[in-house]
Image (cartoon, helix red, strand yellow):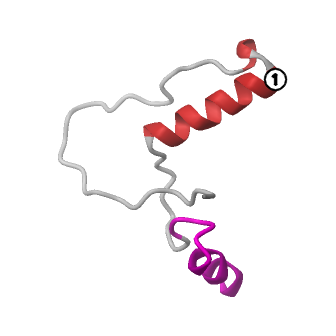
Amino acid sequence: MMMAQRLYEAGHITYMRTDSTNLSQDALNMVRGYISDKFGKNICRIARTSTPAKKTRRKRTKRFVRLM
């Protein structure tokens, strides 16, 4: 945890204390772009991983750790 704190203080990660796996659309697009550039467009399919069963009020969660 000390290393995570140092990375956070240096601005290298966004938030270190979360169990959330939510990623922003910007982060997903960045990762997909990198994978497509590095390995080819056929390797990275753009698809939803899950579909909510019904619309419900979801509490806002912190985003998954992202390298800056």
Task: Say if 9 sits above or below 25 in the image.
Answer: below
Q: What is the secondary structure assignment of the residue under circle 1?
A: helix
| Front one among 9 and 61 | 9
Task: Say if 19 sits above or below 32 in the image.
Answer: below
Q: Give coordinates of residue 36: x percent, y percent.
A: 71, 23
At 63% from the left edge and 36% from the top edge, which residue is drawn?
31
Q: Callout 1, which amino acid? A: Phe
Q: Is residue 24 magenta?
A: no
Q: Quadrant of the N terminus?
A: bottom right
| Front one among 68 and 52 | 68
At 81% from the left edge and 23% from the top edge, which residue is drawn?
39
At 23% from the left edge and 32% from the top edge, which residue is drawn?
54
Give the side of residue 55 with respect to residue 2, left or right. Answer: left
Give the side of residue 4 with respect to residue 55, left or right. Answer: right
| Front one among 2 and 56 | 2
Query: Among all residues in the image, which is located at the extreme top?
Result: 42
Residue under label 1, please give it.
39
Query: Among all residues in the image, which is located at the extreme right?
Result: 39
Q: Is residue 8 magenta?
A: yes
Give the side of residue 22 with respect to residue 11, left or right. Answer: left
Q: Give coordinates of residue 18: x percent, y percent.
A: 49, 68
Task: Say if 52 sits above or below 9 in the image.
Answer: above
Quarter residue 24 falls in: top left
Q: Give coordinates of residue 50: x percent, y percent.
A: 45, 30
At 18% from the left edge and 47% from the top edge, which residue is drawn?
57
- For the record, the magenta segment spans 1-15
Local crowd at mark 1 within 10 Å, few (<14), some, or many (≥20)? few
Tally the numbered discs.
1
Q: Give coordinates of residue 2: x percent, y percent.
A: 67, 87
Q: Quadrant of the C terminus?
A: bottom right
